[in-house]
Amino acid sequence: QVQLVESGGGLVQAGGSLRLSCVVSGRTLSSSFVGWFRQAPGKEREFAASIRTSDSRSFYADSVKGRFTISRDNAKNTVYLQMNSLKPEDTAVYYCALRLIGSTSYSYWGQGTQVTVSS
């Protein structure tokens, strides 16, 4: 059974940094995409970043480009999201998800971790 567990969320002041972790169990990271999504109160869930685990090619939403960095450690089966220069509008529940290469959707999701950025 594939499980994803996020951690690293918290309260930070604007301009600060946080690093989120997503530990994947039940399968290796190979041949997959791992993505970070976020959902702010009253808003739809949106894509933030993803990484193709085979070659570490990464993708970012325009809203986080240049501030967030996604990376992976295959040995630890973990994907990270380093978030710098945080803004109040980054406040959301952050979810990681896994999509197998060849699949059109993310099939596995974590429970989410809260990130709150104060002004």
Image (cartoon, rainbow, N blue to C red):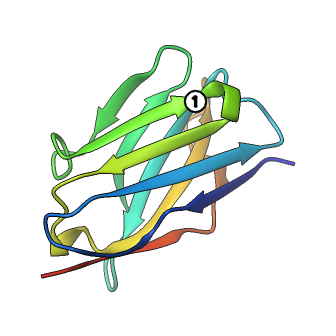
Give x and y (percent) for residue 76. 68, 34
Q: In the displayed structure, would residue 113 be above or below residue 51?
A: below
Residue lying at the far top in this picture: please name it.
55
Identify the residue under disc 1: 73
Rendered-image quadrant of the C terminus: bottom left
Task: Give the image location of residue 65, x and y in percent.
Answer: 18, 42
Q: Residue furthest right?
A: 1
Instruction: Residue at the far bottom: name it.
Output: 42
Q: Residue at the spot x=58%, y=50% of the render?
A: 22
Q: Secondary structure at mark 1?
A: strand
Q: Left or right: where does residue 16 sit relative to residue 41?
A: left
Q: Residue at x 42, y 38 (%)?
A: 50
Between residues 6 and 44, which one lies in front from this camera angle? Answer: 6
| Residue 14 makes an appearance in the image | yes
Going by the numbered disc 1, the residue's amino acid type is: Asp
For image coordinates 20% across by 49% down, the residue present is: 64
Percent across and percent down for residue 115 are 38, 72
Q: Is residue 105 left or right of residue 43?
A: right
Q: Position of residue 98 (x, y in %)?
A: 61, 42
Figure check: 61 above or below 10: above
